[in-house]
Image: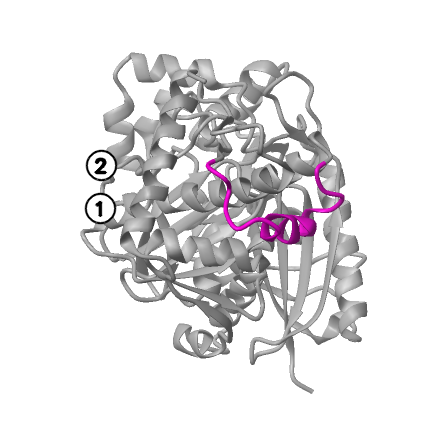
Amino acid sequence: MSKLLLAIDQGTTGTTALVVDTSGKTLGKAGVEFAQHFPRPGWVEHETRDIWASVGAAVTRALAAAGVAGDRIGGIGITNQRETTVVWRRDTRAPIHRAIVWQCRRTAEACAKLVAQGHARSVRDKTGLVIDAYFSATKVAWLLDHVEGARGAAERGELAFGTIDAWLVSELTAGAEHVTDVTNASRTLLFDIRTMRWDDGLCALFGVPPQVLPRVAASAEIVGRTLGLDFLPDGIPIAGIAGDQQAALFGQACFSVGDAKCTYGTGAFALMNIGSAPIASTHGLVTTVAWKIDGRVTYALEGSAFIAGAAVQWLRDGLGLIKQSSDIEALARSVESTGGVAFVPALAGLGAPYWDPDARGTITGLTRGSNAAHLARATLEGIAFSVRDLLFAMASDAGREIERLRVDGGASRNDLLMQFQSDISRASVERPHEVESTGRGAAMLAGVGLGWMSPEDAAGMLSLERKFAPSISSQEGDAHLARWSDAVARARSGRT
C-alpha cells in the first residue's frame, strides 16, 4: 500500500492539514482556528499551546477525512506563518512567553532607532530586507529583554529561538531537533542570504545571542522524525519546510525565472522567481530565499499588501454591508462600475512598495448616488490595484514584464476580482483547481525531500481551473490607474 504525504500549514488564524498522494491529489483536509490576543494596541500574540492543539486536531481530522490511519503517512511537510517568534527552554520545551506574531508592531520604535543610526543599507545588503518590526530579530530581543532572566539564560545556551516551523519540529520530535529552513531563516534579519549563514554582526546589532539560533537546513531534506505524539506514529520523517509564501510559490510550480504568484489571504503576498542570484530592489520590495533544493538556492522578490481579504472582512464585520465574505462578488456585480468611488485599503498602513505606516484607509469619489455596491466593487478593485503596484515594482526591479500571474488563497475564487486583476495588470491570471497552494507546496517539498519526486514532477501535478485574460483597453487601464494614484496620494497625505 503506497504511502501518503501530510502537509501541516500553520497559519496566522488557524492550522490546516492536508493528506496528499504522490500525484498531488488532496485526499483529506481539515482546518482548526485558534484565538488571537491583542494585549495592547498594535500588539499581536498567540498562545503556543493553542497553536499546538490546533495542529493535533487538524491532523487528526484530515486523516479521518481521508479515511486513513497515521501509519499511511510516509512524510511530513511543514509550512508556516513566517516571522512569528517563539523562544522556549531547551530542557522543558516550555515557551517563556506567548509567540509574538508577525503583525505585531511593539518593536517599531526600536527599528526606527536602528534606521536613524544608519544601519538600513548594511542590513539590506546582507538580508535583502528592510529594518521593520514585521521581521523576527527585534521580536527575539524584546523577549530576552522583557522576560525576567531570559537574556542570561539565552547567553548560557538554555533557550532556543525559532519561527513557527522550528518550534513545530521541536514539538514533533520531542525536542530532539532545533532546526529551521533557509526560507524562514531569511525572514529573521539575522541571516545573510548570500553566504546562507547566520551573521554574527547582525546578531550583535539586534542583540540576539547566536546560542539561541537553530540549525539551518534546505527546504527539502529529512530534518527529524516524529516521536512521542498522540496523533501520529513515531518515526515519520519531516522532509520539507518552507515559509508560507515560498511554499505557495513552489506549489504553483513557479520554477522558471520570471514566474510569479500572488496569494490572496488576510493580506496579499506576491513573489517572483528571480533565479540563482539575489536582486537588490530599488522599488520598495524585499529579496528573499525562495527555496534550497539539492544544494541549489533560488531567490525571489517579494511584496506584501497588508490588507486584502481583511478589507472584505471589514465590510462584513465593521460596516455590516454583507453577511459573509463570499457575498461581496454578487453585491459588486450589481453595478457596472464603482461610479467613480476608489478605496485604498490602508487599514494598517501601506506595505510595499510604499512602506508608509502612517497611511490610512481612504475612500474617494463619493457622491449622493454612491451605494453599498459601489463600495463593494471599489474594495475588490482596491485589492487588485494594491497587487498591481507590487507586480509593477517586481517587473521594474527584474527588468522583465510579468506576462502570467498564478493565484491562490481564498479571495482568488472571486471571478470579478481575478478579472480586474488581469485587466489592470495587463497579464494573464491563472487559477488552479486547488487554491490551497501553500499546503500543497509543503507536501510537494516533502516528496522531493524523501526522493519520491523531483520539482519537475511537482510542476506536472499543477492543474489549472481557469485563465483570465485582459479585457479592457490600455486607455481604460490608464484611466483606472490615474484614479488609483490620486486616491493613494490622498491616503498618504491625509487629504480628503
Query: Where's residue 146, x and y in %?
Result: 59, 14
Q: Give the range drawn in magenta.
A: 321-340
Identity of the residue drawn at 73% across and 45% down: 52
Left or right of residue 490: residue 118: left
Q: How crowded is mark 2: few (under 14 residues within 10 Å), some or many (20 or more)?
A: few
Look at the image and tell me in which quarter the N terminus lies: bottom right
Mark 2 and mark 1 in contact? Answer it, CB < 8 Å: yes
Say which quarter of the image contains residue 433.
bottom right
Return the mark for residue 282: 2
Q: In which quarter of the image is the C terminus?
A: top left
* Nearest to the observer: residue 11 or residue 391: 391
Residue drawn at point x = 62 percent, y = 52 percent = 329
Position in image of residue 51 (x %, y %): 71, 42
- The residue at 65%/36% (across/down) is 315
As helix, strand or loop, the secondary structure at mark 2 comes to loop
Q: Which amino acid, mark 2?
A: Thr
Q: Residue 276 at x, y = what percent? A: 25, 57
- For residue 178, the mark is none
The residue identified by callout 1 is 396
